[in-house]
Image (spheres, rainbow, N blue to C red):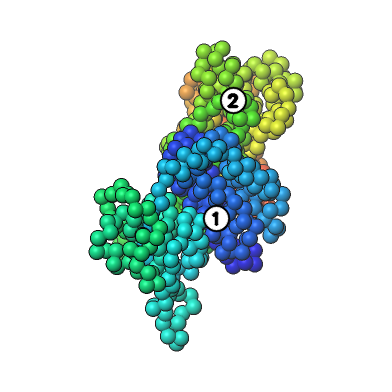
Amino acid sequence: MDNPLSEIFIEEAEENIELLESRIIFLENDPEDQETINEAFRAIHSLKGGAGLAGFTKMKDFCHKAEDLFEKIRCGELKIQKNIITVLLQILDVLQVMIGNIKNNIDADDEANVDNVIEKINQISTSESSEQIEEEVQTKQENIYFLELNYYPEIFKSGIDPLMFIQDLKKAGKIIEIELKTNNLPSLEEYDPHKFYLSWKLFYSSELDSKGIADVFCFVIDESEIKINCISDLPSDNPDLKKFIVNEKTAASVLSDNIDPSPVISTEKTKVQLNRRASDLNSGSYIRVQTDKLEQIFNTVSEVIVSQARMSMLCEEYEEILPDNFMLVSESLKSIIMVLQEQVTSLRMVNLSGTFNRFKRVVRDMASDLNKTINLEISGQETELDKNMIEKLNDPLKHIVRNCIDHGIETEEERIKLGKPAAGCLKMAAYVESGKVVIEIADDGRGIDKEKIIKKAIEKELIPENYQMSETEVLNLIFHPGLSTAASITDISGRGVGMDVVKNAISDINGTIDIISEEGKGSSFRLYLPLTLAILDGMLVSIGTEKYIIPTLAILEIFSPELWQLKTISGKGEVVFFRGSYIPIIRLHEILDVKNVIDEPRLGELIVVVSNGVKAALLVDSVMDQYQIVLKSLQKNFRKVENISSATILGDGNIALILDINGIMQKRV
């Protein structure tokens, strides 16, 4: 990674690979979509150019082979079929391995299965029948163009080699005549080696239409002056022909040497000058910023928030002696800092489209391996989450999706017998609800067999026989390590690992997960997540002389119970009546070992919290206030502390610990 271009190349390559994967999966369902084919071609073309510029020759050579296959598809020489999609995805796998190798400073082709995939590319490229090739030749027509290539002076800064486009033109047709123009070269004293001063004029013959030629220059056409003129469509007496000269050779002489005198179909436009980016991605302006720099900005803003909270507290304390103007300035500063905080937080927010689209490949491959037909429906991918959270979500989401496909959705034969559509349906959705981001993964499969789970849990001595459990408690048993209801061990499931990983990963990002399942109709997994990991809405509570924070994401209600609501049940301990049922009471002072507390529930306050669908009431002395707090990692700055997830600095400068509600509930309920 000593190569200064490596970091830029890797970042751009990962974006192109992600784009390439989504386009290939899309083409499997709509193989005739020419714009998607063009986008896929441009992505592999960009990968090749970037690898060559950064000096990764092995990756560039592999991309060149892959590009040849994409070119045949783009030109219509190959029709997309399932076997071609499979090879395209194998190309993608090789590219991902190569990027990983480059990151780890090892040879790009190490364990990348390059030779095997190249052999498959060659087999597909040569397997087309001569009949189809002959048909294509008959339907295509050679066009003659006059091209002027005037690149923008800063082209080198974007890492693009101008000669690359000349080479691409040679691959797609024949350069009849070319002239290098040096009239823009400055004097030696004014020469800037970082700028580009050359330009070209050329006569060019190709089967491509004007749009196809514009696609060759798609990476520079916005900033450069690329003129494309189809001269073979012009009548011989058109005065424009006299303007087109390359190396003193006129357009008329080129046409007489290279074109059949028979009439050609005229077009409405005799001159096509395209000045647009063929991909039409968007016209927005962007700048790449390292994540570390964003973290530093965010940490600085966090300190400003703490200082502002301290100022507000001092203003309340000395309100009587402070001038009115000072109070107004304090309130104004508070408003400005809130806006600043929202803006800085938004810099780390990215939508879920990339994450969701990645599962199109996962679902396709797993369905194929299990001989199932599954349609993936995605919605809400524009919902935004903290980038750090999205990175931590990939593994738990993958486990849930695999679980739905393997355990949940039946085979085609089973579904037909049950009167269901042959193809199963897997839905991935995201939306915002009550200040939380909800990610829902649902299938229309067989549902979760609760009796089977209970039987397995009794076998493993997780619960005693005849133990009464609610439906939610039964479903939550699947999160227990080592509990699997799979009939046999496979590469996909059956080893009792996976769902416990999901629960732990979701807890690590201060989220919760609920399961809803109906036998014979399917299951739904709902993940409730905070918008960001860095800032948390919390309720400050007092327990004895100590102060703690409970995340409001987990809180359902706060109340002081009446005597009739309190009971002690054998085997369950203390419970309180809440919304039609009894839920357990957790005395936080016992867990946290705090003395001199209110231990009578009627004199204190109960905070009803929910974790993984299970409710409990936390006993505290009093609820003080709600705060928006900046999280500080205890594990990073001190060590892991049981029952505590992190810490924060309050406005008075004191430290308050944030309770790990999921951990407390798991041990006590």
Q: Please state which of residues 240 and 252 is positioned toward the viewer in this rendering.
A: 252
Q: Is residue 340 above or below residue 179?
A: above
Q: Earlier in the sequence, mark 2 or mark 1?
A: 1
Amino acid of disc 2: Lys
Write down the quadrant of residue 178 in the picture: bottom left
The x and y percentages for residue 343 are 41, 55
Callout 2 touching callout 1 (CB < 8 Å): no
How many numbered markers are drawn? 2
* Residue designated by label 1: 47
* Structural distance between the alpha carbons of marks 2 and 1: 34 Å
Amino acid of disc 1: Leu
**Residue 258 showing in the rendered view:** yes
On the rendered structure, is 65 left or right of 280? right
**Residue 507 showing in the rendered view:** no
Residue at the limit of the structure toward the right, as seen here: 460
**Quarter that holds the C terminus:** top right
Mark number displayed over residue 372: 2
Q: Residue at x 28, y 49 (%)?
A: 266
